[in-house]
Image: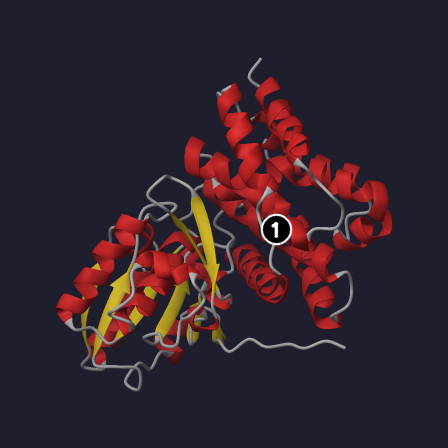
Amino acid sequence: MWSFHIPTVVHFGREVVKKRADFVDYGSKAFIVTGRRSARASGALYDITKVLIGQNIVFTVFDEVEENPSFRTIEKGTDLLRAENCDFVIGIGGGSPIDAAKAIAILGANPEMGVEELYSGEIAYSLPLIAIPTTSGTGSEVTQYSVLTDNDGNKRGFSNAHAFPLLSFLDPRYTLTMPKNLTVSTALDALSHSVEGELINNGNNPMIKDFSIKATSLIREYLPRIVAEPENLFYREKLQYASMLAGIVIAHTGTTVVHAAGYPLSSKKGIRHGIANAVFLVDIFSHVSENSKDQVLKAIEPFESLNELSNFLNEFGVNNISISIEEKEISEWAEKAANAPHNIRTPGNRDRSFYEKLYSKLKEMEK
């Protein structure tokens, strides 16, 4: 028995905003949430504002979202939305601006709520939310997840049905301005979503299995091609489609301890999220494989072995990162990872010592 549900209406294709965007039924004043660069550089912000002006909809731009958006940024954005009396939200950018837009849309509809209450699960309303991704990685445009960074510098994700965007517009042209390192890290994030989600799904939902193998296949085939030909729009289109499929996968399954292990690297050490996942992916899947070998092999299809997957990741320098880690940090990170809810979803058992060994292995790379 299985089920499938994605409430987001997806419009996909070149110049899709120009051809399909109609916002008049969503409100009279838009609150646009972006970072400082990608929305403008990609042309997405121009396209959106042109459509809004053409439909006589006023808008306010909040362009202060950083990578790994902080609680303070969410609070600042929410205060501005409320002051400007905006009634719907448009998130433009990578996963960080779209995740921030989700939080701001919910808080904007619930004036009594603070950021911390996003994690209570007791959310009844959200302002209408529209997502326009400019990267191919997080799949946030089709998920109910938002990952924020709390006031102690820890990444924390919340999940709520009201965080699903109502509409998403995917135009591969917006991903052409991604530099190589961002193209690689976001694609590896999508790959991680695809194989992690299928590890959890284990074939039980045939649609999720099909989406996973398709997403993994596309990334395996087209990521190396994009690195060689970064301006090839056809390749970019394939990678964006893969990212969306992988997002649909984790919308139904969640992620594994690969994500839990990787969070400190991005929130504390500035390693991009996709790379932080990829660093641990093979080691964690190898551990799972000790008792669930067939499950792992099916999850990583069409890769035929973890060795092949490892070689693919190494093509993009995953094992070449160098960061300084203190013993105290290893202990603190291991404690948090061992208590993360991702452990429940991930096959097998892991204790604190497992994560200490995982982080200690990474520390050895300093030498």
Note whether residue 36 is visible: no
Q: Quadrant of the N terminus?
A: bottom right
Residue 281, given in percent of the width and then of the height, sits at 66, 41
Q: Residue furthest left?
A: 83
The answer to which image quadrant residue 108 occupies is bottom left
Q: Residues within 10 Å of mark 1 (few under 14, many from 20)?
A: some
- Give the total of numbered labels: 1
Viewer-nearest residue: 259 or 140: 259
Q: Kindly identify the residue that appears in the image at 64 percent across and 76 percent down.
A: 4
Q: Kindly identify the residue that appears in the image at 51 percent across and 65 percent down.
A: 143
Q: Kindly identify the residue that appears in the image at 30 percent across and 82 percent down.
A: 26
Decide if residue 201 is on the left or right side of residue 143. right
Is 208 rendered above or below residue 153?
A: below
Is 33 rendered above or below residue 338?
A: below
Residue 241, given in percent of the width and then of the height, sits at 57, 63
Secondary element at image label 1: helix
Decide if residue 226 is on the left or right side of residue 103. right
Q: Residue furthest top?
A: 367
Residue 325, given in percent of the width and then of the height, sits at 50, 22
Note whether residue 96 is visible: yes
Decide if residue 209 is on the left or right side of residue 268. right
Q: Residue furthest bottom?
A: 25
Is 26 rendered above or below residue 33?
A: below
Q: Quadrant of the C terminus?
A: top right
Residue 323, given in percent of the width and then of the height, sits at 49, 23
What residue did someone put label 1 on?
342
What amino acid type is highlighted by mark number 1? His
Viewer-nearest residue: 26 or 200: 200
The type of colouring in the image is secondary structure
Decide if residue 98 is on the left or right side of residue 75. right
